[in-house]
Image (cartoon, rainbow, N blue to C red):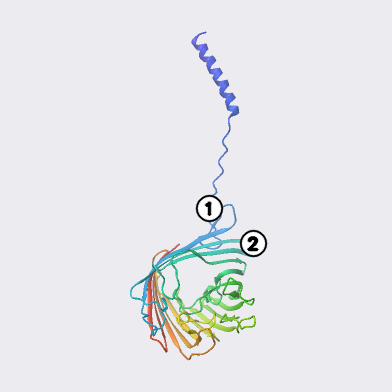
Amino acid sequence: MNIKGLLLGSAAALAAVTGANAADAVMAPEPEPVEYVRVCDAYGSGFFYIPGTETCLQISGYVWYQVGTGSYDNAFDTPSYNYGVSQQDGWMKSVRARLNIDARSETEWGTLRSYIRLQADWNGTGSYPGLGTNDGPVGIDQAYIELGGLRMGYTESAWAETVNGISSYGSHTWGGLYYGYQERALIQYNFSSNGFFGTISLEDDALDGEGYVPDVVALVGYGGGWGAVWARAAYDESFDGTSDGFGGFNDGGFAASIGTQINIPNMPGSSFRLIGYYADGDHQYGAGSSWTAFSTMGNSEFSVLASYYQQFTETFGASVGVQYFNDFYVAGTDISTGVDGWSADLGLVWVPVTNFEVRTELNYDDNDVDDGTVSGYLRFTRFF
């Protein structure tokens, strides 16, 4: 056999073996197409579709660093707005981290939403006296479900905030002066149509059982490009939370509020707010004051709050507010003290770049009995 024949025979044998092995080879599956995250623009910016679903998700929040101080010195001073009865002989530092998780999808009954707000605070090696301990643990600050106009869970009371945002809170500053801020376990229904809006809310100040009758808050209002007007009423079924000795609780209390916001023509972002408050005792739905948490004084019978905000440029704005309190109650009762008081605030806000805010606020608190106090802070916040 010559060399040429030997080579041809070897090539034929090799081809046969290769073909046989190929028949037995395992073919690798084709890679699945990559599913990229899709933007969801149905609910505003920042939402995206959870892969494989029609649910839109938004993750947002902020981190702030704050430095402040106050003039409170002893029991003859009015508790300060920002630091209560803490005696300041230096700068008070604090850090807050907040994470919001917002999931929404459409159903035949309207938008189905779940909202979770996680928050952690740090204010130094200890806590501010009288303000509790807030040194780092992350907790669920709010969590609720919405379906159409129905909201249920633990969140801000309708006395302070609703989905109709223009009627929420107090003055234009972050603190807002004294308007009865609180968070509640609640079930509420919100509606809006042709400028009219309203809320009815059944609320409880505790997650554990304590009586069967809820507190009730109702809100009605009308708004447009010019601003809004609104009115609130609230019933606290047991404002001092004590037993009446017969298996029930002491008498409830009533509160009401009426307010307006006027948007200044030809000055985008600028507005004036005027809000009045009434309470028939020191219960959950009064206007509150710096005294409420730190003395034997409770809410006032009447209070009037006025606030103005001016947007000077796209990056800088300022506000000034004042609040008068007529006739504080003895804490936990409907007994009048005859003592009046007043508070004021000043706020400056600068946003040098997108999502970064520099804010400073200054507060003054005074009453007929104690000396006045000043408190304030400088805060740096990064939003996302």
Residue 380 visible in the shown view: no
Residue lying at the far top in this picture: please name it: 1
The three-letter code of the residue at mark 2 reads Thr
| Disc 2: which residue | 107
Q: Position of residue 375 (x, y in %)?
A: 38, 78
Does residue 257 lie above or below 190 as drawn?
A: below
- Mark 2 or 1, nearer chain start: 1
Task: State the residue at coordinates (52%, 12%).
Answer: 6
Q: Position of residue 94 (x, y in %)?
A: 40, 68
Residue 59 visible in the shown view: yes
Answer left or right for 69 relative to 26.
left
Does residue 144 lie above or below 177 as drawn?
A: above
Task: State the residue at coordinates (58%, 84%).
Answer: 254
Q: Identify the element where label 2 is drawn.
A: strand
| Disc 1: which residue | 37
Q: Position of residue 179 (x, y in %)?
A: 50, 79
Q: Position of residue 304 (x, y in %)?
A: 48, 85
Front residue of this view, candidates 348 and 339: 339
The Cα–Cα distance between marks 2 and 1, rounded to whole angstroms, is 22 Å
Front residue of this view, candidates 315 and 78: 78
How crowded is the residue under tag 1: few (<14 C-alpha within 10 Å), some, or many (20+)? few
Q: Which mark is residue 66?
A: none
Tell me how many marks there are: 2
Q: Identify the element where label 1 is drawn.
A: loop
Residue lying at the far front in this picture: please name it: 245
